[in-house]
Structure formats: C-alpha cells, structure tokens
Image (tube, grey):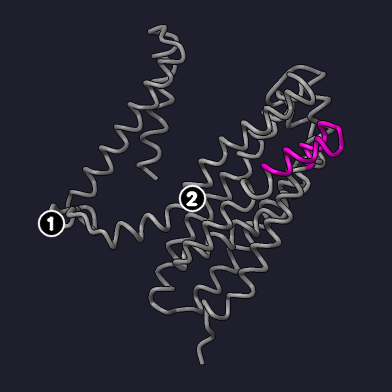
Amino acid sequence: MLSVLIGAILNIVLDPIFIFVLGMGVRGAALATILSQAVSAAWVVTFLCSRRSSLRLHRVFMVPNKRIIGRIAGLGVAPFIMQSTESLVTVVLNTGMQTYGGDLYVGSITIMQSVMQMIVMPVQGITQGTQPIMSYNYGAQNFRRVRQTFKRLLTITLSVTCAAFLVIALFPGLLARIFTPQPQLIGLVSRVMPLFFGGIWAFGAQMACQTTFMALGQARTSLFLALLRKVILLVPLALILPRVTGSVFGIYAAEPIADVLASATTLTLFLTRRKKLLPVEE
C-alpha cells in the first residue's frame, strides 16, 4: 500500500508544479509520472534489500533461470494481453463512432469507457488480491480453501458488477454530468449508457473464473479467456453490427453481447473443469 501511495501522491504533487508553475504542459505531466514511478520503484527495491523484508533480495538469486522465467511469462501473458487489447478496442470503437455517428458519438464512447474503468479497476483489484491466496493454497493442495476462496470471490465480483449495473440503469444522466456540461452530449449518454452497460452485471463472473484459472497455473486457458471478450467477440461485433443494422447503435450493442457471451463461456468452462482442477478430498 505504501508503495502505491508514494507514487500516486508524488505524481499528484508534481503534476501542477511541472504543468502550471514550470509551464511544461503535457510534457510536464509525463515527466511527473515517470519521476513518481521511478521513486516508487526505488523505494520498493530498497525495502526488498533491507532486513525489514521477510524475503530479501540477494545477488545469488538474481541469476536468470529459463524455467522460472518461462513460467512467470506464461502466467503474465493473459493480463498483459488484457491491458494491451484495450488500445485496440478504443481504436475500433472510436473509428466506428466517427464513421457512423460523428464527434458527439465519439465523446459519448469516451465517457462510457471512463465509467467502465471505474467499474473494472475495483474488480481487478479484488481479483488480483485474491489470486496469491488461491495459488498458495493450491500449491499446498488445500483444495477446500481454494473452493471457498473462489465462492467468496465470485460473490463479491458479481455483487460489484450487479450494483454498478443498477446505478448505471437508474442514474445515467448523473454519471454523464461528471464528465461533461454539454446538454446534447449528456442526453446522448443518458440514452445509450444503459444499452452499452447492459451486460456488465455478468462481467464479475468472467473476472472471477479467469483469475482462478490463472491462480491454478492454467496459463493457456486464461490466455484464451483474456482474448475472448475483447479480441474474439467485441472487436468483430463492433465492426459487423453497425453495418448489419445500418446504425451507430450497433456499436453500443456490441459491448453487452460480448460481455454476456464471454462471461457465460468462462463460467461454463470453469464449472466443467473444476472437479479435475480442484478434486474433493475424501
């Protein structure tokens, strides 16, 4: 927590200094981010090399091991792809909105993607915090604890996404006003936001199951699931639906369809493989 706070607080302090006081503009914001991350990284390395750390870094342990690097990279590919595909999705959605709608529709999708981040980030924090608990108990063959952790994780993530869906369905205009004062843009976002987030309630199931697969060392399955929602489903749907429907609203509909299909596939795959991955102790 301290590691995160050091970087975040320093970034908040340096941003106005570099942007306004020194007049560096966007370059100042970039420099503030780099410096704050560097300070945070230096603090972490210093702590890990000190006696306060229960797992201290030593030079003898810094020798590269191909087997260990390969396993780490295999498990890290899925979250890496999830993050990198966000750029692809943004390009496809913005291009489609500009083609079939115009600047107003590009603004609406930008607002809704910001709201999406407000929902996804807490869910990702919960799942990432749960992953080492499941991995530790899975390695210790304490399958009962892993199953209990998964059930709690699934309950929490679904609760968060279902609550988010209700807030969006009931107060889309209020959320839109956070990002813009323009009445026309607020009106458009208020109409399309319930459609765009129509499948977000199911997203919690996908995140819980995908994280569990990763925690159990199922790198290939987790990679497939990471690609499923964004690359395999959302991008093709965002390209096809507006052409089929002849309307920009086909792009808005692509998101809930991809969410529901991906979540249903992920949950089904996990339920069919759970007995093999997590056998019940006699």
Tell me if mark 2 has few (under 14), some (14-19) or many (20+) residues whose alpha carbon lies within 10 angstroms of its own: some
Horizontal side of residue 266 vs 13, given as left or right? right
Residue 153, located in which quarter of the rendered image? bottom right
Q: Which residue is mark 1?
A: 60
Residue at the left extreme of this rendering: 60
Quarter of the rendering containing residue 238: top right
Front-most of residues 74 and 48: 74
Magenta stretch bounds: 235-253
Give, as a three-letter code, the residue at label 2: Pro
Identify the mark nearer the N-term, 2 or 1: 1
Above or below, 173 relative to 244: above
- Residue 243 within the segment the image draws in magenta: yes
Q: Which residue is mark 2?
A: 79
Where 125 falls versus 33 (above or below)? below
Residue 100 placement, left or right of 157? right
Q: Residue at x 86, y 37 (%)?
A: 245
- Residue at 38 percent across and 77 percent down: it is 140
Q: Secondary structure at mark 2?
A: helix
What amino acid is at disc 1? Answer: Val
